[in-house]
Image: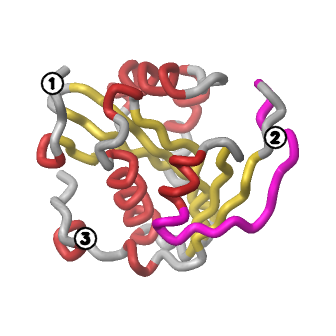
Amino acid sequence: MKSVDKEAVAIIPMRLEDLDEVLWVERSSFRDPWTRTLFEEEFKNPDLSHFMIARCEKHVVGYMGFWLIQEEAHITNLAVHPAFRRRKIGERLLFATLHLASSLGAARATLEVRASNEPAKRLYEKNGFQLVAVRRRYYVDNNEDALIMWCNELAPFRHPWKKQGELESA
């Protein structure tokens, strides 16, 4: 695939038809990836489970998901294919996902991140997440700790892309 610029990436809701490409991103991003069955189960709970994808031309290059539980968005996954990292695709996915969560009634968001994942930690901190606790030996593949982070105010994410000086997600 060619080099991607900001204008070439669309952030849109994920459909079941996108699953093969989402799995391509998932397997390239995680040591212990979600299975097709796990993703299919998410689609059976549309009031709980919400996913967005980043599409570059005809290809899914990233995705992000969350569960909406009352007024909380629990971020389940954020992944960008390694060939498309460092292009702010993850940040755009995060913004669009938190915008969606806020529009659905979420007042705050939480997530777990590997203690060693410095780029992800910086992304979350830059966007208002704060470290609140540690889950010791949370990740089963290597017993790594998970850092629990919270963003207690989703109001900044309620505004559409254009008001944030970004392209509108279409």
- Name the mark nearer the viewer: 3 or 2: 2
The reply, left or right, for residue 110 in relation to residue 124 is right
Q: Secondary structure at mark 3?
A: loop
Q: Position of residue 27 (x, y in %)?
A: 51, 20
Dot 2 or dot 1, earlier in sequence: 1
The reply, left or right, for residue 10 in relation to residue 105 is left
Amino acid type, mark 3 = Pro
Mark 2 crowdedness (10 Å alpha carbons): few <14, some 14-19, many ≥20: some
The residue that label 3 is drawn on is 160
User: Disc number at residue 94?
Assistant: none
- Name the mark nearer the viewer: 2 or 1: 1
Q: Pick whichever, 165 or 45, lies toward us.
A: 165
The reply, left or right, for residue 144 in relation to residue 121 is right
Give the residues in magenta.
125-141
Q: Based on the displayed image, in which of its 4 quarters is residue 163 positioned?
A: bottom left
The residue that label 2 is drawn on is 138
Amino acid type, mark 2 = Tyr
Q: Is residue 92 above or below residue 9?
A: below
User: Disc number at residue 2?
Assistant: 1
Q: Is residue 163 above or below residue 2?
A: below
Q: Is residue 168 above or below residue 160?
A: above
Q: Is residue 79 above or below residue 97?
A: above
The residue drawn where x is 37% and y is 51% is: 93
Query: How far separated are the C-alphas under marks 2 and 1?
Result: 37 Å
Amino acid type, mark 1 = Lys
